[in-house]
Image (cartoon, rainbow, N blue to C red):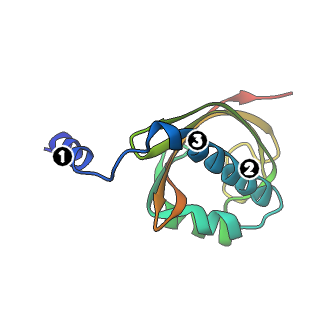
Amino acid sequence: MGATLLLNSCATGPARITQSESANAIEQVVALNERMVKSLSRGDLSVLERVMAPEARVNGPNNKVATGHQILERFRNGALAHSEYDRKIEEAYVSGDVVVLMGEEVVVMRGSNQANVGEKMRRRFTSAWRKNNGQWQQVARQATNVGSIP
């Protein structure tokens, strides 16, 4: 039943981004992603608060799924924080009305209750972005630790 609902929602979803709009959409999302990464590196949540869609879900490197609201709360209360955050986008493409980013990131966690605090960790990530009221927002994110960097 879940797959049927998903199929139906895709079939009746918003209009697709046209081919001529694709490059512009990717450029906008990549720039917004870069601003978000820079602000998170400084401990500034203002960009993340704007780009996290209300329905967002994050499948984190701790192998748990959280809502966007839960992720924001973890940042706000200090349970989740980065002392270093660098992201390299290896693939960016449009699928329907969504811009997908994929690549590698290097992070050093400094939050409480975090595994690998203080270690430089390499992760693979995927994020999906969709326009909401004319603004690009992250609707899904997945990150997997692939190892520490000496």
C-alpha gap between disc 1 and disc 3: 30 Å
Q: Tell me the tag on residue 139.
A: none
Which of the two discs, 1 and 2, labels the residue nearer the N terminus?
A: 1
Q: Residue at x 67, y 34 (%)?
A: 123
- Badge 2 marks a residue whose secondary structure is helix
Q: Mark 1 points at which residue?
A: 8
Q: Comparing marks 3 and 2, which lies closer to the viewer?
A: 2
Q: Where is residue 48 in the image (x, y as percent from the top left)?
A: 64, 63
Name the residue type under label 3. Pro
Q: Looking at the rendering, in which quadrant would you find the N terminus?
A: top left
Q: Name the residue under label 2.
A: 34
Name the residue type under label 1. Asn
Question: Which residue in the rendered view is the most extreme toward the right?
Answer: 150
Residue 144: quarter of image: top right
Rate crowding at label 1 as few (under 14), some (14 to 19) or many (20 or more) other CA atoms within 10 Å. Answer: few
- Badge 1 marks a residue whose secondary structure is helix
Q: Name the residue under label 3.
A: 61
- Badge 3 marks a residue whose secondary structure is loop
Q: Residue at x 68, y 59 (%)?
A: 80
- Marks 1,3: beta carbons within 8 A: no
Residue 2: quarter of image: top left
Q: Residue at x 64, y 50 (%)?
A: 28
Which residue occupies the foreground of this view, 81 or 139?
Answer: 139
Q: Looking at the rendering, in which quadrant would you find the C terminus?
A: top right
- Marks 3,2: beta carbons within 8 A: no
Please indicate, yes or no, whether residue 63 appears anywhere in the rendered image. Answer: no
Which residue occupies the foreground of this view, 110 or 100?
Answer: 100
